[in-house]
Image (cartoon, rainbow, N blue to C red):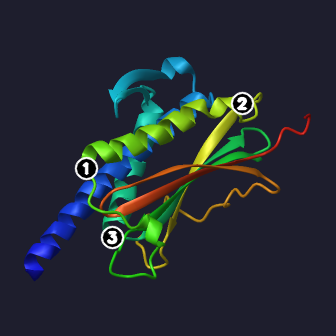
């Protein structure tokens, strides 16, 4: 029985990791598209989760994500990553204007110290998981209705919060956490697999002209 439990846990971990990495790829693309960090012609439309999403066709961004996502996958498999943050910065001043945060939690029903009871889920179907992911993507898409307009040219930075003992490639050096003082915050929906839970939130600088 112990061997079977371990195998099932491994299956859950691998499957959950794949789902989360795929979600991050679409979420990052959606944010960069919706917030105008890249031109709209730098994206193509694809079908996923029962909705139309965007995926970059820009070679430099594709290469960046090709390097980023496998490392995130490695940290997830090792249980060494706590959150992923996408910060949008003013290109000239480097001021942080938006901070999209995705908190990652391992669900352990046998350990009450890891997460609340609400985070503990029964086994979920792929359809249920995709429905939850679809709702987050829809919120990202509709974010333009409440986020301030980005009038100046912007760039972005992605941060990973890992455990102290995690193996970190040299290109992932220490970085400014890009905290926005007196920020407005909007908590987005969450989704969970049979192994992980992801909570999403966006913080943004208030429009001083309002």
Circle 2 — which element?
loop
Circle 1 — which element?
loop
Alpha carbon separation for disc pair 2 and 1: 42 Å
**Which circle, 2 or 3, is nearer the viewer?**
3
State the count of labels.
3
Circle 3 — which element?
helix
Residue 109 vs 182, above or below: the answer is below
Alpha carbon separation for disc pair 2 and 3: 37 Å
Q: Which residue is mark 3?
A: 78
Q: Which of disc 3 and disc 1 is earlier in sequence?
A: 3
Q: Nearer the viewer, residue 89 or 139?
A: 139
Alpha carbon separation for disc pair 1 and 3: 24 Å
Give the residue drawn at x 42%, y 50%. 68
Q: Which of disc 1 and disc 2 is earlier in sequence?
A: 1
| Most distant residue in the top direction | 41
Give the residue drawn at x 44%, y 77%. 114
Q: Nearer the viewer, residue 113 or 6?
A: 113
Residue 33 vs 204, above or below: the answer is above
**Position of residue 44 measured from the top left corner of the image (x, y, whole percent):** 41, 21
**Position of residue 90 measured from the top left corner of the image (x, y, whole percent):** 74, 40
Q: Crowding near pointer 1: few (<14 within 10 Å), some, many (20+)? A: few
Q: Nearer the viewer, residue 124 or 6?
A: 124
Answer whether residue 30 is visible to the viewer in this image: yes
**Which circle, 2 or 1, is nearer the viewer?**
1
- The reply to whether callout 2 and callout 3 are in contact (CB within 8 Å) is no
**Which circle, 1 or 3, is nearer the viewer?**
1
Residue 32, numbered circle: none
Question: Within the image, what quadrant is residue 195 found in?
Answer: bottom left
Answer whether residue 168 is visible to the viewer in this image: no
Q: Which residue is mark 1?
A: 125
Q: Which residue is mark 2?
A: 153
């Amino acid at each position: 029985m112990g061997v079977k439990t371990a195998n099932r846990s491994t299956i859950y971990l691998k499957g959950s990791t794949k789902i989360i990495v795929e979600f991050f790829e679409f979420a990052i693309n959606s944010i960069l598209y919706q917030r105008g960090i890249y031109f709209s012609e730098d994206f193509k439309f694809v079908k996923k989760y029962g909705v139309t999403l965007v995926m970059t066709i820009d070679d430099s961004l594709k290469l960046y994500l090709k390097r980023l996502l496998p490392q995130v996958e490695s940290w997830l498999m090792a249980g060494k990553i706590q959150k992923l943050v996408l910060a949008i910065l003013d290109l000239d001043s480097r001021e942080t204007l938006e901070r999209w945060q995705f908190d990652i939690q391992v669900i352990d029903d046998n350990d009450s110290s890891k997460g609340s009871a609400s985070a503990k889920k029964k086994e979920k179907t792929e359809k249920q998981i995709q429905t939850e992911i679809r709702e987050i993507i829809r919120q990202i898409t509709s974010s333009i209705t409440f986020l301030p307009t980005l009038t100046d040219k912007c760039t972005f930075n992605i941060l990973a919060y890992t455990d102290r003992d995690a193996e970190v490639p040299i290109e992932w050096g220490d970085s400014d956490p890009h905290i926005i003082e007196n920020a407005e915050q909007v908590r987005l929906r969450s989704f969970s697999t049979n192994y992980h839970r992801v909570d999403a939130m966006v913080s943004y600088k208030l429009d001083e002209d309002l």
